[in-house]
Image: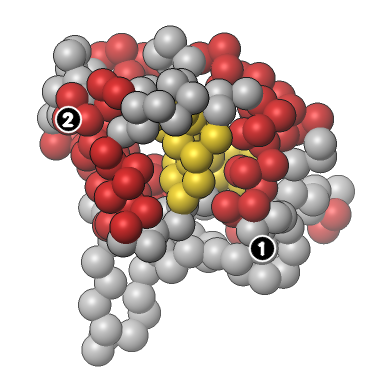
Amino acid sequence: MADKGVDPQFAYWKPGSEERYIRIFMSHRWGQDRELYEQVLAKLRSQGHCIDDVSLNERQQIAGPRGGDVPDLNVQAEVAARIFTADIVIVASRPGITRSEWVMWELRVAAIGYAVPILFLDFDNQQRRAAIVTEIAGLGLQHDVCQPVVTEIVPRVIKLVGGRPKWGMRLQEADPNLRFRGPPLLSAINKKLPYRAALPDISAS
């Protein structure tokens, strides 16, 4: 997992060696569900889980297109790399979700491109569940649906990520006979948001 460009304090973590930070990507992190997302992160941390929020930051999201349009290729490349390294994607499942090309693109990248588990927050008591949820279920892709309530969201996040993760993600391929096709900005995101051990590095003290 270690990347030559990663700070030495993070380089000691190896897949399977110990618990690491849970990496969460939240679609439209700084939109109308900002307060709910903050409460979810706070609850997870209060239960002893180490969390890395790998969503776009507020400046990046505000700079993006309006009306649900897909962002330009530069933003798409960064979002794809962030989703690739995430353990779970959380998205609000409102009836209008399918009209947002940006959100639908994120879901396709997560579910079909990288097989990242998705948690849909159902704001309509499952009366008008978005068609995309049904389609993902039909493909047998890993996902769950719950009400936008912290006490429902948190246990489902833990279940979908498999508890306290220790596994890593292939970031490159050393064998010249094998081709690795990951997102083009993967190396840059790995340097900006590296995988982190949940326990402090005692060798650094």
Relative horizontal placement of residue 137, taking residue 102 as reference (left or right):
right
41 lies above or below 145: above
Residue 73 in the image: state x and y as whole percent.
14, 36
Q: How is the image coloured?
A: secondary structure
State the residue at coordinates (43%, 10%): 32
Residue 58 in the image: state x and y as whole percent.
41, 16
Are dots 2 and 1 in contact, CB under 8 Å?
Answer: no
Q: The residue tagged with tag 1: helix, strand or loop?
A: loop
User: Which disc number belongs to residue 5?
Assistant: none
Q: The residue tagged with tag 2: helix, strand or loop?
A: helix
User: Which disc number belongs to residue 166?
Assistant: 1
Give how far apart the Cα atoms at labels 2 and 1 are: 34 Å
Residue 10 in the image: state x and y as whole percent.
63, 52
Mark 2 residue type: Glu
Of 135 and 118, which appears nearest the observer? Answer: 135
15 lies above or below 113: below
Relative horizontal placement of residue 201, taking residue 183 as reference (left or right):
right
Mark 1 residue type: Lys
Crowding at label 2, few (<14), some or many (≥20) Cα neighbours within 10 Å?
some
137 lies above or below 45: below
Relative horizontal placement of residue 44, taking residue 63 as reference (left or right):
right
State the residue at coordinates (19%, 13%): 66
Question: Toward which corner of the image does residue 151 lie, by quadrant?
Answer: top right
In this view, which residue lies farthest toward the front?
127
User: Which disc number belongs to residue 101?
Assistant: 2
Q: Nearer the viewer, mark 2 or mark 1?
A: 2
Mark positioned earlier in the residue sequence (2 or 1): 2
State the residue at coordinates (24%, 77%): 179
Of 120 and 188, which appears nearest the observer? Answer: 120
Residue 103 in the image: state x and y as whole percent.
27, 31
Q: Is residue 117 in sight in this rendering?
A: yes
